[in-house]
Amino acid sequence: MAVAGMRRMSFVGLVREKEEILNKLQDFGLVHISSFNELAASEAAARGDDDGADLSDPAPEELMAGNDLYAGISEKRKILKKCIEELAPFDERKKSLFSFLRPVKAGEIEDAYARRESILAEAYSVIKTDEKIKDAEEAQARLESELSSIAPWKAYPYVPSLANTSFTVTEFLSAESQKEADSFSEALTAEIPESGSYMISADKGLYCFAAVCLREDQTKLDRLISSGRITRYDFSNVDSAPAEYAGNIENYLSKLRDSVSAFKSDREEAARHIGDFEMLYDRLGIEASKMVADANFANSSVTFSFEGWVPSKNEKQIRSILEDGHICHVEFRDPRDGELPPTKLENGFLGASIEPVESLYSLLRYGQLDPSAIAAFFYALFFGFMFSDAGYGIMLTVACIIILVRCKLKENMRKYIVLFLVSGISTIFWGVIFGSWFGNLVQTVTRGSFALKPLWFDPQDSANTEHFLAFTLLLGVIHLFTAMAMKAANLIAKGKWLDAIFDVLFWYIFYIGEILFLLPYIPYYGKTAFCERFSPYGIYFLLAGFVLILFTKGRKSKNPFIKLFGGITCLYSLVDMLSDCLSYTRLMAMGLATSVIINVFNSIAASAAGLDTAGITFRFIVFVIIFVAANLFNFAINALGAYVNACRLTYIEFFGKCYEGDGREDSPLRFDTEYVYIEKDDKANVRR
């Protein structure tokens, strides 16, 4: 449970050795190179100038604007990325569901970089082929629509565009029913006596006919068409009889389909090179990251320099690496007042697992105590409490172990899987405590002759409802009080003992008084001997806490009234604390939802299987099919609910009381890949 101590690093070296030093820094992977904005912010903070303290680091694209070499690499990576995405459906390599990074030797990725021109030529070819496929498919869709439109008119034996004469006008029309077509013909005869209509075809609810009138009556005909549910067809571009025209379209469509098939065959062939595309994409990314780092160097004709941050424990190691065989000067110092070093978390197995969840909230500020291990413990505790089925817990735990053992994962993904592994173990624990093994599966299958008993109590038993509710409230109080303890620890670590007493201890007294005062009204606990003995003291704790907070909360204000009575607002905190505790009742709701839904599905499966009416083989098969399908759905929906609600309790109830965020991200120069994992022993061989 620690934030790594950081040391400020200043380096000056020779330009002729810059390339090799960059490679060593990237291989080492722990040196955070400061941008010029970061340096300016640090200098401003050291001067006490708050205006410069919030200078943000520019995005790589902004920093490298105008650098043609970087722009070229970025463009090549975009092309490769597009190729990889387009060829993914045709990739026939053996895949694992959770294998996110493909391990490669450094020699393989360097070989791909050496062949970059031929690989990029293949990538451009894939892009061109993709464009041809899209053009052909668009033309195919357009022609298919045109073919569908002209198909009902195949019975017309002449060229439609030649139907008009200098004296007459012919319109080709359609209606959705015989009644509409007949009504139009009657209206046409009534409105324009010197006119006529005749049916051409009637198929699938579409009635096609032609209407003919004298040219001077065209306005009347147009008005009749627009006033009814009649569709007009434009054949001005059709230069042959509809049947012949449709045949030409079909022939062209056949050729288009053949060309699309040929292009897709080319895609399947190109998919054999997807591994090369992935390696070159990541290798170019390595080059791009070095260029971004180089842009933050101060250069002269002979020397270059930079400043950055390294973990304190790695200071000697980085000094040895850089001074070995190089003419350079390396200097380290502690952070000055006002400087904000990047935050690098150093947690064990449990604490590291919740770091990705923390990062979604905010990055911990440097100098704060890291609550990761405690937060991870409560997260897993609450997740398991809400999931609360031993069978589901075993499924989750086994799946996480398989993924961790068999798959190369990105660091954040690996931490997520570890978090779910710990949560799965917690789920098994609570499932055993509450006696839920795929709900009441054993009892259902044995038709009540045998059941697995809970080690503590069954939450679904109405006699235990108050006990279950009271226990969730107790968990909430423990969680909130632990967050307050973390706040006190942070204040004490900074030497602010009085603040720890005034802002935490006095609130402990205040909240303990509230809890003891309300204890008689809390289900289950109100009937205990503890309540009878200690609840009378609640009013004294409450009043003592109120008085202490009343005269100390406003101590930092310059306004004498607020300084003396600033704590009056603590009365609102009585309601605030109560609402915070009540939010933990979601643990009870989610825990009951999981087990109740399982039991309902078990009953449905048993009923559908016909336990008393079918043969044992058929009965077993039906039961298993329904049981598996229903429980997979329940597993997914309740795992998601447990994850979201555990995050909410962590973010709002725990971090909201003790977590100081807005830290600067530690972004060391390193091998950061998206598709491949460069095996560690060979990393040093990756060179420009």
Image (spheres, helix red, strand yellow):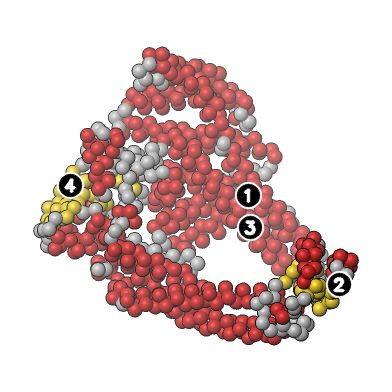
- Residue 332: numbered disc: 4
Residue 535 in the image, given as x and y percentages of width and height: 56, 22
Quadrant in the rendering for residue 361: top left
Q: Is residue 405 above or below residue 275?
A: above
Mark nearer the N terminus (1 vs 3): 1
Q: Quadrant of the C terminus?
A: bottom left
Q: Amino acid at mark 3?
A: Phe
Between 509 and 675, the one nearer to me in the picture: 675
Q: Residue at x 69, y 38 (%)?
A: 463
Mark nearer the N terminus (4 vs 1): 4
User: Can residue 486 be seen in this snapshot?
Assistant: yes
Quickly name the residue at label 3. 633
Residue 636 in the image, given as x and y percentages of width and height: 59, 56
Secondary structure beneath dot 3 equals helix
Residue 529 in the image, given as x and y percentages of width and height: 58, 26
Q: Residue at x 47, y 63 (%)?
A: 403
